[in-house]
Amino acid sequence: MKPLILYSTFALTAMINLSCASCTSEKINNSMNDKTDVYKILHYASLAGSSHNSQPWRVEVYPNDSLTVYADTTRLLKVVDPKGIEMLISVGAFIENLDIAATALGYDAEITLVENSMNSASTVAGIRLRKNGSAQNSELLKELELRTTLRIPFDTLDIKEDDWEKLVALSPGNIHFIPSSSAQGVFIANKELEAYTIQAFQKEAQDELANWMRFSNKDVNTKRDGLTPAGMGIKGIAGFFVRNFMKPEDSKKESFIQSGVDKTKKQVENCGGWILITTEKYDDEEWINIGRIYERLNIACRSLNIGFHPMNQIVEVPQIYKELSENILQGKEIRFAARIGYVSDFPAPVSKRRPVEAFTVFH
Ligand SMILES: Cc1cc2nc3c(=O)[nH]c(=O)nc-3n(C[C@H](O)[C@H](O)[C@H](O)COP(=O)(O)O)c2cc1C
């Protein structure tokens, strides 16, 4: 994804608590008590990750618990994702969470993907929920609440074979693990930094990113999407400064961009390995499938105390992508890249979500 600074941070290091945003169990349980199961399932679905936290999904719910899920093309990142591939990956992540939440609440979700969804009014899937009588599985719901993107430096320890094998087993053939200490791992780290830097200095990508920056507390709490100082790991005095004195436009300033590049250097140098997700096919259904795999991986990493940080600039910047495909996993279409590594003190999720009503029409 994109960019710039954004996924960056300031060099200042004063500490501030990462207060969990909207998603602690207690808060959710209190505010969800009087909601229908479908509402709850959609809430948990919306905790999925998405590029720039654009939350590009839309849902229509019909009385017999059937749902139609759409890609919200008004939220497409036209510059860094002109073909809408990452948008569909994000909707796939939403569908994966929806499926898990339905299971957790005692439903089977029959999911039918629409072929060529972008040519079918962006209709991605029809979903029928059927109650199956199983008891609620709070553990599964908790896993959805705890999943998060982590942009802190990770431990550089090798990922244990047992652990990376578990991750790859989630979708063998699609998921590839590359240790950061290997020659290929070093190559990916260098190319990630190069791709980030190229994109960070591209005017159009900067403009697009600025549109998704939520700096002030007011913006964070009213828009409930996009990239916030807490989500970008901008803490302490720097966080105070950004929240109170910076405007999204300021993210295009050289100093902010450079701090993002510096931070990215630390990120790529501090991890235990890289995850690449590949596909054999090139169609809308495949992007949804990749989104489902990404979400599952991110959830599984959390349960193994492994931090997970998508870094998709390497796929988005054409000249770097070309070098990547010529050198790594030749013949396969790499569509998603993430840095992973052990984390001793896992912070709580901080990224905001829009309420269910903001993306759903109940008929
Ligand atoms: C397709 C896709 C691409 C992404 N690319 C990046 C990226 O390049 N850099 C990054 O820091 N985060 C990236 N992310 C993570 C999102 O920014 C993150 O999911 C979103 O801000 C919500 O935060 P959360 O995952 O903590 O809930 C990506 C996510 C998706 C689904």
Image (cartoon, helix red, strand yellow):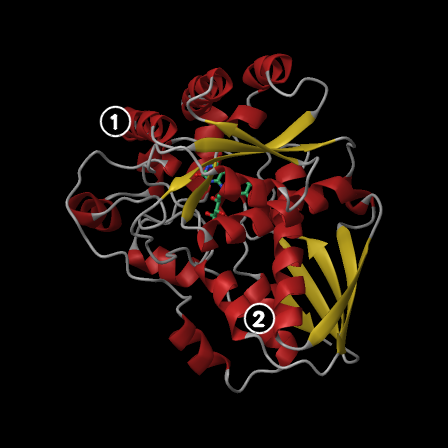
User: The C terminus lies in which quarter of the figure?
Assistant: bottom right
* Residue 137 visible in the picture: yes
Location of residue 290 by image quarter? top right
Q: Amino acid at mark 1?
A: Ser
Q: Is mark 1 within 8 Å of ligand 1?
A: no
Residue in the image at 52% along x and 62% along y: 144
Residue 210 x/y as whole percent? 41, 38
Q: Is residue 282 above or below residue 107?
A: above
Residue in the image at 42% along x and 46% along y: 306
Say which mark, if any, is on residue 26.
Answer: none
259 left or right of 294? left
Location of residue 221 by image quarter? bottom left
Q: Amino acid at mark 2?
A: Glu
Residue in the image at 32% along x and 54% along y: 347
Residue 263 x/y as whole percent? 30, 30
332 left or right of 213? right
Q: Is residue 282 above or below residue 56?
A: above
- In this figure, which residue is indicated by the disc labeled 2? 357
* Residue 358 visible in the picture: no
In the rendered structure, which disc, 2 or 1, sits on the residue that comes first in sequence?
1
Q: Nearer the viewer, residue 171 or 259?
A: 171
205 left or right of 230? right
Q: Is residue 103 above or below residue 181?
A: below
Residue 138 x/y as whole percent? 52, 74
- In this figure, which residue is indicated by the disc labeled 1? 255
Mark 1 surroundings within 10 Å by alpha-carbon count, few (fewer than 14), some (14 through 19), many (20 or more): few
Q: Secondary structure at mark 1?
A: helix
